[in-house]
Amino acid sequence: MEISTRASNDIRIVVIAGNLDSTTSPAAQKALDAVLAGAKKVALDFAQLDYISSAGLRVLLGAAKQQRASGGTLRIFGLNQSVREVFEISGFSSILAVYPSEADALGAM
Amino acid sequence: MRHGFRMSVGADPDGVGKVSAAFAGFAQTHALPEAVRRSVNVTLDELLTNAISHGTAAVDASLLTVEVELDLERLTVTLTNDGSPFDPFGQPAPDTTLSVDDRPIGGLGIHIVRELMDEVSYERRDGHNVVVLVKQLVE
C-alpha cells in the first residue's frame, strides 16, 4: 500500500493505492490521522485501491467518526467494483459519503 | 487440470501477510479474474486475522495452514489452524444498518466472507479448526 496526499483549494485529497487490509491498516491509520488533524475537508481517492477488508473499513469508520466529531467532512471517490461490493455488503455505502468521481466528491465540499 | 499450493505460516500478522502475498502471486500466475482474486484476498485477511484473535477468546493457534486448489470451474481454499475449537460462522450477523456513531468497530469480517464466497463451511477435525471456502470462477 502507498499513501500520498495532494491539495485542491482547501480540500486535502488522500490517495490510497494497493490494499487496505490487516497488514496495511496500521500505517494507513497513522497517515490518515495526521491528515485529519490538520484538515477539515478531506477526500479519499480510491481509484488505485485494489481491495479492502474489514480492517480497512475500521480505519475508515474511525476517520468518519473523527471528522464528524470535529465538524469536518470526509468524502470517498473512485471505488472499483470489488471495493464497492465490500462497501455494500457491510452497509458502508450508506454511512460514508461515497461519490463516483473526484469532480462529484469535491464539487459540493 | 488442477493447480494449487499449500503453505503453513505462524499465527501472527506477519504470517497473514505472507499468505496474502502468496495468493496474489498465484492469482497472477494463473490469470484468475480480478474479482475472484480480490474476493479471496479479502476472505483470507478476514479469516486468518480471525484465527489469530477471535474477539474475546484467547490467542492460542500457533500454526495456520492454507491450501488452495484451482480447477476449471472453482477455487477451493482450505484453512486449518491448531487453536481451540472456534466456528467463525457460528456468530450472528452484525447490524449493517446502524449509523456512523452507533456502529461498533469490528464484527463485519465474517459477514463479508459469507457474502463474497459461494460456499463456506467449518468443521472440527483431528484437533484442528478446518474452514473450507469455495468461489466459483464462472457465475
Image (cartoon, coloured by chain):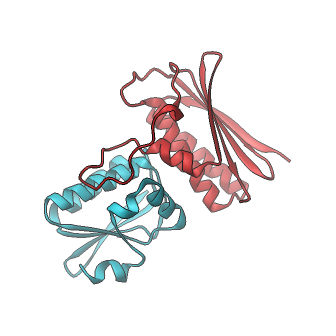
Chain colours: A cyan, B red
Q: Say above or below: B2 vs B11.
A: below
From what the image shows, is residue A100 above or below residue A65? below
Q: Is residue B8 above or below residue A15?
A: above
Residue B85 location in percent, x, y? 52, 20
Q: Is residue B23 left or right of residue A38?
A: right
For this view, does A35 lie left or right of residue A1?
A: left
Q: Tell me what residue is drawn at x 19 percent, y 61 percent.
A: A68
Question: Residue at position x 43%, y 72% from top?
Answer: A78
Q: Which x, y percent locates residue B37?
A: 62, 54
In percent of width and height, residue A74 lies at 26, 67
In the image, residue B83 lies at what x, y percent? Answer: 51, 21
Name the residue furthest right: B1
Q: Is residue B53 left or right of residue B103?
A: right
> In the image as oriented, which residue stretches furthest toward the left?
A70
What residue is drawn where x is 27% and y is 55%? B100
Q: Is residue B100 left or right of residue B34?
A: left
Q: Quadrant of the C terminus of chain A?
A: bottom left
Q: Where, quadrant-wise, is the N terminus of chain A in this rendering?
A: bottom left
Counting the numbered discs, the total is 0
